[in-house]
Image (cartoon, rainbow, N blue to C red):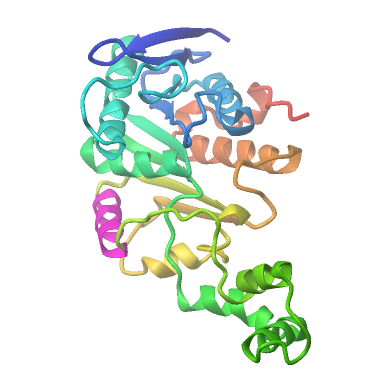
Amino acid sequence: MREKAITFGGNKSLVGIYTRAAVDNPGLPGVILLNSGILHRIGASRLHVTIARMLAGLGFPVMRFDFSGIGDSEPRRDDLAFEESAPREVQDAMDRMEAIAGCQEFVIFGLCSGADVAFQAAPMDRRITGLIQLDAVAYRTWKWYLNYYGPRALRLDVWIRFTARKLGGLFGSTSKKEKEELDMETHALPTYVREFPPKEDFAKTLGVLADRKVKQLYVFTDGMYMEYNYKEQFAETFAGIDFGDTLQVEHWPDADHIFRGPAPQKRLYATITEWMCKNWPAAGQDPDDTVEQPRVA
């Protein structure tokens, strides 16, 4: 496995790690792994390192890099907001990959905010032909509300505490802790509010990507339970879009947001491997026979 630190961008201020493909194959896309939040290029639970080496073993050249101001990349010297600069830096990364590996198309991988940036960059550049979106944008449906509030409506303890609070302690005083728990049960207020674009805007971009036949893999975990709680939710939300065979959606309620633990990681690696090899068969018909799978401690 050959890995090399590289710099790129207008002022050579962006830093990334390029993992060379085990076998040169011009027909395969390059893969670019994006930061999630302020985590640098190794990724949450070292996912980026493992995925980069795994895909390189299948024949895909891979880069994992830091956005400006994260990890080893220098802060930007202009006044561009992150929402504007990050998609441009994805394009800078593609330009660098094209120069060193000859890549003509790319798959962009992102988790959480990284998925958001990947989605923003996709309509800007036709070289992007694939997206791997982990805990990406989601919108609630009526089934989401049914799945979330239905079980709670049948819990006696929730109703007792709710009534006690509303009637001023008729069933006894309500402690601060009980009030906090009640708020979570009845109002379901998340501790972190993530801003999603209007559904109509997201759907419009999805339609553009579907028309371009961009291949998309979505994996939603329990980290998105406040927005996504059943597998068919994405397809039902965007039922008016004809994805053909370009869309795959997974819902893993037993995995957390950063895929901690051997089982979720092993499942993620296998899913990505299968999806990549299905959509780009030149990577090998049966990668399990030719590539050592990542070890998960």
6 relative to 80, above or below: above
On the image, the x and y values in percent for residue 59 come to: 50, 20
184 relative to 45, above or below: below
Most foreground residue, 174 or 128: 174
Residue 94: which quarter of the image? top left
Q: Residue at x 46, y 31 (%)?
A: 35
| Residue extent of the magenta highlight | 199-211
Q: Quadrant of the N terminus?
A: top right
Q: Residue at x 47, y 78 (%)?
A: 142
Q: Residue at x 36, y 10 (%)?
A: 7
Most foreground residue, 123 or 127: 123
125 vs 269, left or right, is left
62 relative to 244, above or below: above
On the image, the x and y values in percent for residue 196 come to: 37, 56
65 relative to 110, above or below: above
On the image, the x and y values in percent for residue 253 come to: 65, 57
- Examine the structure image and report whether residue 248 is included in the region drawn in magenta: no
25 vs 163, left or right, is left
Residue 240: which quarter of the image? bottom left
Please tell me whether the stretch drawn in magenta is mainly helix, strand or loop: helix
On the image, the x and y values in percent for residue 292 come to: 68, 22
Q: Quadrant of the C terminus?
A: top right
Most foreground residue, 115 or 219: 115
**Image mark count:** 0
Q: Residue at x 44, y 13 (%)?
A: 24
- Examine the structure image and report whether residue 208 is included in the region drawn in magenta: yes
182 vs 243, left or right, is right
